[in-house]
């Protein structure tokens, strides 16, 4: 008899939970919560699995000009046949750091003209209109996904996607010939 009471109580509790959940469902489409699922943040390095914001490395003096060590752009590359997870961080002064796989980071400095070209590509009004997510095209098996962060805005593109000319201009202006795709 004790077993029957426990079973009956469990069944009653389950029915109440289901009924309570159904009773609380929104009545109209306008009352429904947003159920869209956001993609996970892109990995940003060998040991870090979240994207870093492009926050200033040092405070700005007058609020107009970025500090030389402030991050200008961060490019994270994932995928490919070898399954790379690489990151390129370029600062306003043209210095940059490349993280590839588990190897030690590589540092360098762009020429003044190269840094100016990259800044111009990122500040071009056409770049501000580049869609934040891929817009179509055939994806490439074992291709790369690129996460480009500039001024707190993330743009994601993949190999095989229709790459807008303004985004290609940014890729072409990156140091070392573009996003780091080597394993």
Image (tube, rainbow, N blue to C red):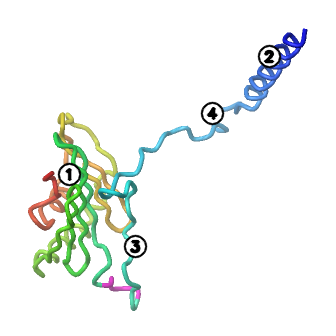
- Return the disc, 2 or 3, that comes first in the chain's sequence: 2
Q: What is the distance, in whole Å, between disc 2 and disc 1 at their CAs?
A: 58 Å
Front-lying residue, 140 or 182: 182
Q: Quadrant of residue 169?
A: bottom left
- Secondary structure at numbered mark 3: loop
Q: Residues within 10 Å of mark 1 (few under 14, many from 20)?
A: some
User: In the displayed structure, would residue 93 be above or below residue 122?
Assistant: below
- Return the disc, 4 or 1, that comes first in the chain's sequence: 4
Q: Which mark is residue 164?
A: 1
> Which residue matches tag 3?
55
Q: Main secondary structure of the magenta part?
A: loop
Dot in front, 2 or 1: 2
Of all residues, the one furthest to the front in this rendering is 2
User: In the displayed structure, would residue 30 be above or below residue 110?
Assistant: above
> Which residue matches tag 2?
11
- Return the disc, 2 or 4, that comes first in the chain's sequence: 2
The boundaries of the magenta stretch are: 63-67
Return the x and y of residue 172 as percentages of the image width and height: 12, 61
Asked if the stretch drawn in magenta spans residue 66, the answer is: yes
Q: Residue at x 33, y 47 (%)?
A: 133
CB atoms of marks 2 and 3 within 8 Å: no
Q: How many marks?
A: 4
Q: Which mark is residue 115?
A: none
In this picture, residue 167 sits left or right of residue 132: left
In this picture, residue 24 sits left or right of residue 67: right
Q: Residues within 10 Å of mark 2 (few under 14, many from 20)?
A: few
Q: What is the distance, in whole Å, between disc 2 and disc 4 at their CAs?
A: 32 Å
Q: Residues within 10 Å of mark 3 (few under 14, many from 20)?
A: few
> Which residue matches tag 4?
29
Q: What is the distance, in whole Å, between disc 2 and disc 3 at their CAs?
A: 54 Å
Dot in front, 2 or 4: 2
């Amino acid at each position: 008899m004790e077993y029957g009471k426990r079973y009956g109580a469990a069944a009653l509790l389950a029915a109440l939970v289901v009924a309570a959940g159904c009773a609380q469902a929104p009545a109209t489409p306008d009352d429904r919560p947003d159920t869209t699922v956001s993609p996970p943040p892109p990995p940003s390095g060998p040991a870090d699995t979240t994207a870093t914001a492009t926050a200033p490395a040092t405070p700005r003096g007058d609020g107009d000009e970025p500090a030389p060590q402030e991050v200008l752009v961060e490019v994270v590359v994932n995928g490919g046949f070898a399954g790379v997870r690489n990151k390129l961080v370029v600062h306003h002064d043209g210095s940059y750091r490349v993280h590839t796989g588990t190897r030690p980071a590589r540092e360098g400095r762009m020429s003044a003209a190269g840094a100016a070209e990259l800044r111009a590509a990122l500040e071009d009004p056409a770049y501000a209109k580049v869609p934040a997510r891929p817009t179509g095209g055939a994806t490439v098996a074992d291709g790369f996904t690129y996460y480009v962060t500039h001024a707190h805005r993330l743009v994601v593109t993949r190999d095989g996607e229709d790459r807008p000319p303004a985004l290609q201009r940014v890729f072409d202006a990156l140091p070392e010939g573009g996003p780091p795709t080597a394993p």
